[in-house]
């Protein structure tokens, strides 16, 4: 079955290889010390096409998420990262790590590839991109860069692009254009995050590698550090994720996370319908996050919304979840969560949507459904609205994930 494309234009967004509630909570554990804490977060990945295109979601992911541990690290590697059944990036390696040393408190994320190639249209070799976000001596700063050993546009080598200036736009006949060394940083009242992308491919004309109108980010990194605070807000949300045993079949869709909040603004991340090859069809997905940190109160809320999911003959209606957490200056902590599922049907047979925490429904020969799967600690709550264990595929599909918490 060939995956369908939901949106023509695709945004490269932050993602993580979170398996489910249990592994999410491991990222947030730590002491409840009243001393000021730093928040560290970052990721690196090989390619990202956040839609129904083949191999939806990020590939070759390394990620640390909202931790107060200055020694956290993650790394990953893969022979090739594919987009639309073409091996675009080869021998890809990613890593991200936090630190607290003479350089300050911060995060560094790296991604490398032996080459990035689109047939005879484009060939980039010896590619490395990196970004760092730092808090030192009361100041926030960042660095980001990309270098190449070789750059060839069509049959022409372009040595002037081996160390391109930030956000260098180059026309590529037969494809459209690319942006090399896309870098930037954003300061907020709570901290700073920086990003770097080796190359963003913009397919503005018909070609055999990337569907026309689609954008693909190749080798993208992000690093984030918060200022010291009495309470740090944390959490994440995504629409769906599928894995078979420890193998990730489809990465988190519409993924959002935070270590800083959003300064009280609601941030929405949406994608169109997609197919998880051989597993499921997923309707439109969007997530939201809203959070802030202040001397009086820190609070955060995540939500997840999925239009529907089909697994073989199993059809699930709209699925939603939310999670919220807050802490006041007098030390009071609050948590809230919810989830809902519109309907469950196999063919013409309708099944009841069970209520309560971790309620289950077994549909013989098809799947086991777990509703409102919740993990809760004193300062953290995570909820999966629905977990589908597909018997015939030995595959678990998580739908409607939201989590929120405070540290400090």
Image (cartoon, helix red, strand yellow):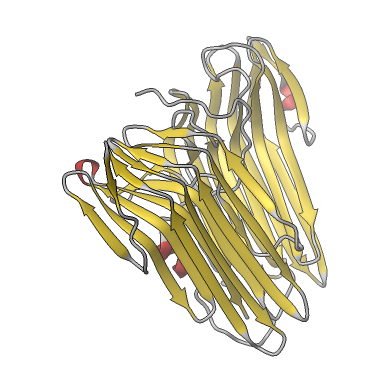
Residue 196 location in percent, x, y?
68, 43
Residue 118 versus residue 39 in the image, above or below = above
Question: Which is nearer the eye, 18 or 45?
Answer: 18
Residue 88 versus residue 50 in the image, above or below = above
Which residue is at a point 77% across and 34% down the rendered structure image?
A: 167
Which residue is at a point 21% across and 44% down the rendered structure image?
A: 366
User: Where, quadrant-wise, is the C terminus in this rendering?
Assistant: bottom right
Occupied quadrant, residue 374: bottom left
Residue 93 location in percent, x, y?
50, 43
Is residue 104 visible from the viewing direction of this image? Answer: yes
Residue 222 location in percent, x, y?
64, 50
User: Where, quadrant-wise, is the N terminus in this rendering?
Assistant: top left
Q: Residue furthest bottom?
A: 330
Occupied quadrant, residue 66: bottom right
Is residue 22 visible from the viewing direction of this image? Answer: no
Question: Which is nearer the eye, 150 or 219?
Answer: 219
Which residue is at a point 25% across and 57% down the rendered structure image?
A: 361
Residue 62 location in percent, x, y?
51, 51
Which residue is at a point 45% across and 64% down the rendered structure image?
A: 383
> In the displayed structure, does residue 240 sit left or right of residue 210?
left
């Amino acid at each position: 079955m060939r995956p369908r494309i939901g949106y023509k234009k695709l945004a490269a967004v932050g993602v993580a290889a979170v398996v489910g509630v249990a592994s999410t909570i491991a990222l947030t554990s730590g002491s409840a010390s009243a001393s000021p804490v730093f928040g560290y977060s970052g990721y690196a990945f090989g390619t990202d096409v956040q839609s129904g295109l083949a191999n939806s979601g990020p590939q070759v992911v390394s990620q640390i998420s909202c931790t107060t541990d200055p020694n956290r690290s993650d790394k990953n590697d893969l022979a090739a990262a594919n987009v639309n059944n073409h091996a675009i990036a080869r021998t890809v390696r990613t890593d991200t790590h936090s630190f607290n040393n003479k350089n300050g408190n911060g995060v560094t994320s790296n991604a490398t590839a032996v080459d990035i190639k689109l047939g005879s249209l484009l060939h980039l070799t010896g590619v490395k991109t990196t970004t760092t976000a730092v808090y030192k001596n009361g100041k926030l700063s960042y660095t980001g860069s990309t270098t190449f050993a070789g750059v060839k546009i069509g049959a022409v080598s372009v040595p002037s692009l081996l160390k391109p200036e930030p956000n260098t736009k180059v026309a590529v006949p037969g494809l459209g254009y690319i942006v090399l060394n896309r870098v930037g940083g954003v300061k907020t009242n709570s901290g700073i995050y920086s990003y770097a992308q080796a190359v963003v491919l913009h397919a503005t004309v018909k070609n055999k590698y990337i569907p026309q109108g689609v954008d693909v980010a190749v080798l993208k990194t992000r690093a984030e550090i918060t200022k010291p605070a009495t309470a740090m807000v944390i959490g994440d949300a995504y629409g769906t994720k599928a894995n078979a045993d420890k193998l990730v079949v489809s990465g988190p869709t519409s993924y959002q996370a935070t270590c800083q909040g959003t300064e009280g603004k609601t941030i929405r991340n949406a994608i169109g319908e997609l197919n998880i090859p051989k597993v499921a069809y997923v309707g439109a997905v969007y997530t939201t996050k809203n959070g802030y940190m202040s001397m009086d109160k820190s609070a955060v809320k995540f939500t997840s919304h999925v239009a529907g999911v089909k697994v073989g003959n199993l059809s699930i209606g709209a699925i939603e979840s939310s999670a919220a957490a807050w802490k006041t200056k007098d030390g009071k902590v609050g948590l809230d969560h919810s989830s809902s599922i519109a309907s469950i049907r196999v063919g013409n047979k309708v099944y009841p949507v069970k209520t309560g925490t971790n309620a289950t429904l077994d549909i013989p020969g098809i799947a086991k459904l777990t509703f409102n799967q919740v993990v809760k600690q004193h300062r953290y709550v995570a909820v999966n609205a629905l977990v589908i264990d597909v018997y015939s595929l030995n595959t678990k599909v998580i739908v409607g994930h939201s989590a929120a918490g405070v540290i400090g």
